[in-house]
Amino acid sequence: MARTPETSDASPRIRPLAAVDLSEVVRIDGLHTGLRKRAYWTRALARLLKRNGRAVRIGLALEAQKGLAGYLLGEVRAFEFGSEPCGWIFAIGVDPNSERRGVASLLLAEAVARFKAQGVPRIRTMVRRNDVPVLAFFRSNGFRGGPFVQLELDIEEVS
């Protein structure tokens, strides 16, 4: 179960992610990845905010007194190979000053509730196998290995 962030902020709140959050999302992501991917996040937020009656998209921001403490982006997707439509979490980020305070768990719990309200039976995500903190986070929130295995081919190695 998600816990309330243990911050000095009186009332952190979850709200819809908005275009005005772009700089903060770029900043938080950059602190974790070492890259400032403004063009990528501009496209991602534009896609999220684009009105489409059929698409189920979730963009959440946890706002604290000092600004954006974290964000989450997800959507319902269906892929080939017999995968039924399901919720996908494709981005989650927490300001380093707000880590270990329940921000990500609170955002994830809200996303789960919203997917469930849309009748989505399961949620998936992809995590680098060597990203132990992120793996531990998702596992501690009930995620387990699913029925698919991601495979890839490095084209440069093919003769």
Image (spheres, rainbow, N blue to C red):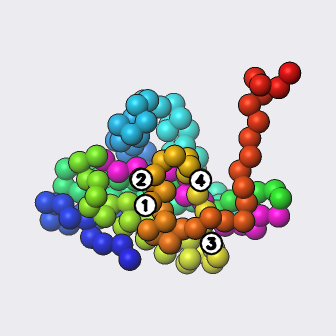
Q: Which of marks 3 and 1 is nearer the N terminus?
A: 3
**At label 4, which amino acid type do we have?**
Met
Q: Marks 1 and 2: CB-CB under 8 Å?
A: yes
- The mark closer to the camera, 4 or 2, is 2
* Residue of label 3: 122
Q: Marks 4 and 3: CB-CB under 8 Å?
A: no
Crowd class of label 1 (few under 14; some 14 to 19; many from 20; radius 10 Å): few
Q: Distance between the residues labelled 4 and 3?
A: 14 Å
Q: Which of marks 4 and 2 is nearer the N terminus?
A: 4
Q: Where is residue 17 in the image (x, y as percent from the top left)?
A: 42, 54
Q: In this view, does 155 lie to the left or right of 159?
A: left
* Residue of label 1: 137
* Residue of label 4: 126
Residue located at (49% from left, 56% from top): 135
Q: Distance between the residues labelled 4 and 1?
A: 13 Å
Crowd class of label 4 (few under 14; some 14 to 19; many from 20; radius 10 Å): few
- Bounds of the magenta span? 82-95
Q: Is residue 7 left or right of residue 130?
A: left
State which quarter of the image contains the C terminus.
Answer: top right
Residue located at (28% from left, 46% from top): 96
**At label 1, which amino acid type do we have?**
Phe
In the image shown, does 58 or 70 lie closer to the viewer? 70
Crowd class of label 2 (few under 14; some 14 to 19; many from 20; radius 10 Å): few
Q: Distance between the residues labelled 4 and 2?
A: 13 Å
* Residue of label 2: 133
- The mark closer to the camera, 3 or 2, is 2
The residue lying furthest to the right in this view is 159
123 falls in the magenta region: no
